Amino acid sequence: MYRFYAIFIGILITIMVTFNGTLDGYLGNYLSILVIHLVGLTAIAGILIFKKIKPVFKKDVPLYLYSGGAIGVLLVLANNISFSTLGASLTLALGVFGQLILSSAIDHYGLMGMDTYKFHKKKIIGFGIILVGIIIMTIY
């Protein structure tokens, strides 16, 4: 079931990047990012109200973990800039490749408090195939 969710996430990210990049063409970088995040804030606030969930902020949460929102803004900005030049498929392919590299390092070293999952050399073959695919996408 979790693999289905992961595929579904990929589909949603593709739709999101496409919509965000297109909105950027109409509104520009900064206004589109503001609108995107205001819509997200409104959506989650509506869900919390509908489900009658009261947000509770715990005191023992490290402050740096709240930086995800700022990283999200940078992510949308970088996606929007890339989308207008590279298109959806290359933007997403390069983004996924970047995720693979960093997530492999996080897994291998147990960074950011994560469990350790050692990197196996066999994965290099998969990384190579993906890289060749991205190079072919870039050329053609």
Image: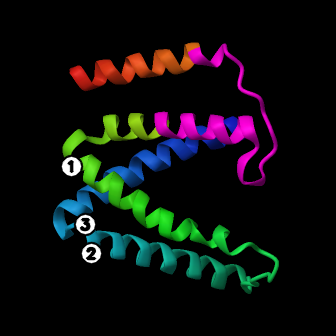
The image shows residue 51, relative to residue 81, as above or below, that is: below
Looking at the picture, tell me which residue is in the foreground, 92 or 13.
Answer: 92
Q: Is residue 19 visible?
A: no
The image shows residue 101, relative to residue 14, as above or below, that is: above
**Amino acid type, residue under disc 3 in the picture:** Asn
Q: Residue at x 74, y 39 (%)?
A: 109
**Amino acid type, residue under disc 2 in the picture:** Leu
Q: Give SS at disc 1.
A: helix
Q: Which residue is mark 3?
A: 29
Callout 3 touching callout 2 (CB < 8 Å):
yes
Q: Distance of mark 2 from mark 1, alpha carbons? A: 16 Å
Place of residue 53 in the rendered image (x, y in percent of width and height, measured from the top left) = 73, 82
Q: Which mark is residue 76?
A: none
Place of residue 74 in the rendered image (x, y in percent of width and height, measured from the top left) = 41, 62
Q: Residue at x 64, y 70 (%)?
A: 64
Q: Which residue is mark 2?
A: 31
Q: Residue at x 62, y 72 (%)?
A: 66
Q: Quadrant of the C terminus?
A: top left
The residue stretch that appears in magenta: 97-124
Q: Distance of mark 3 from mark 1, alpha carbons? A: 11 Å
Q: Which residue is mark 1?
A: 84
Q: Distance of mark 3 from mark 2, alpha carbons? A: 6 Å
Q: Is residue 66 visible?
A: yes
Mark 1: give few (<14), some (14-19) or many (20+) Cα within 10 Å: some
Place of residue 108 in the rendered image (x, y in percent of width and height, measured from the top left) = 72, 34
Q: Give SS at disc 2.
A: helix
Mark 2: give few (<14), some (14-19) or many (20+) Cα within 10 Å: few
